[in-house]
Structure formats: C-alpha cells, structure tokens
Amino acid sequence: MKTQASRKLGKLYAAVKVERKGFNLHIIQSGVCMSKPNTLFADLPKEFNIFSIDGKIIEPTGRFMISTETIDPYHIIVDWH
C-alpha cells in the first residue's frame, strides 16, 4: 500500500483493526482497540473503502488514517480530527 508521509498521533487514540482485501478494508470482529502514542499513521488513500462488520461503507467524521508499521493484510484505522 502506497501512503503519504507518516506521523505519530502523540496520544492514545480509539481505533479499529481492519483486514485488507484489495482496496477494501473490513473491520474485524472485536476490532475496537487503542492505538499507542508512538504508532505511525498516514492518510488513508482515497481509493480505499472501509466496511463495517455488517458490510456497510463507513464515512469518516474527520479523516481516516492508517497505521504504516503493521503487516498486510491487517492494519489499524483511526478517524482523525
């Protein structure tokens, strides 16, 4: 996955674990977690969609950011404000 520059959020942040399937990211069962302050995140590329456990597309309230230090197909997503 090609992403822009990474940055640390600097604090604990509510997040969800997702599984990547092509350009689709699916929230996994029991996926709610907390990101660590030193985890690196980048803006989620626009061609990606995030799906709820029910299979519905989720829109950000701010902007989605994706962890850059995780290994495909699993990643951490935050809705950054």
Image (cartoon, grey):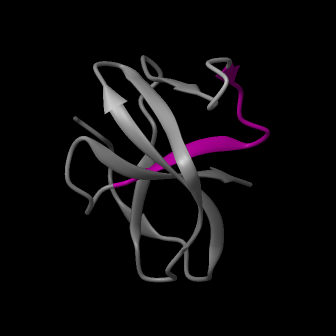
Taking the image as shown, residue 52 lies to the left or right of residue 47, namely right
Magenta: main secondary structure equals: strand
x then y, percent, for residue 68:
30, 56
Total label count?
Answer: 0
Residue that lies at the very extreme toward the front in this rendered image: 29
x then y, percent, for residue 36:
49, 80
Answer with the quarter of the image where residue 51 lies: top right
- Which residues fall within the magenta stretch? 57-67
Please determine whether, in this image, residue 73 is positioned above or below residue 50: below
x then y, percent, for residue 45:
41, 29
Please determine whether, in this image, residue 36 is positioned above or below residue 65: below
Work out whether residue 3 or residue 17 is closer to the camera in this orientation and state it: 17
Please determine whether, in this image, residue 44 is positioned above or below residue 67: above
Please determine whether, in this image, residue 42 is positioned above or below residue 28: below
Taking the image as shown, residue 42 lies to the left or right of residue 65, namely left
Taking the image as shown, residue 47 lies to the left or right of residue 70, namely right
At 28% from the left and 19% from the top, the residue drawn is 22
Verify whether residue 62 appears in magenta: yes
x then y, percent, for residue 81:
74, 55
Quarter of the figure that contains the N terminus = top left
At 64% from the left and 71% from the top, the residue drawn is 13
Verify whether residue 54 appears in magenta: no
Work out whether residue 30 or residue 66 is closer to the camera in this orientation and state it: 30
Residue that lies at the very extreme toward the right in this rendered image: 61
Answer with the quarter of the image where residue 61 lies: top right
Work out whether residue 66 or residue 27 is closer to the camera in this orientation and state it: 27
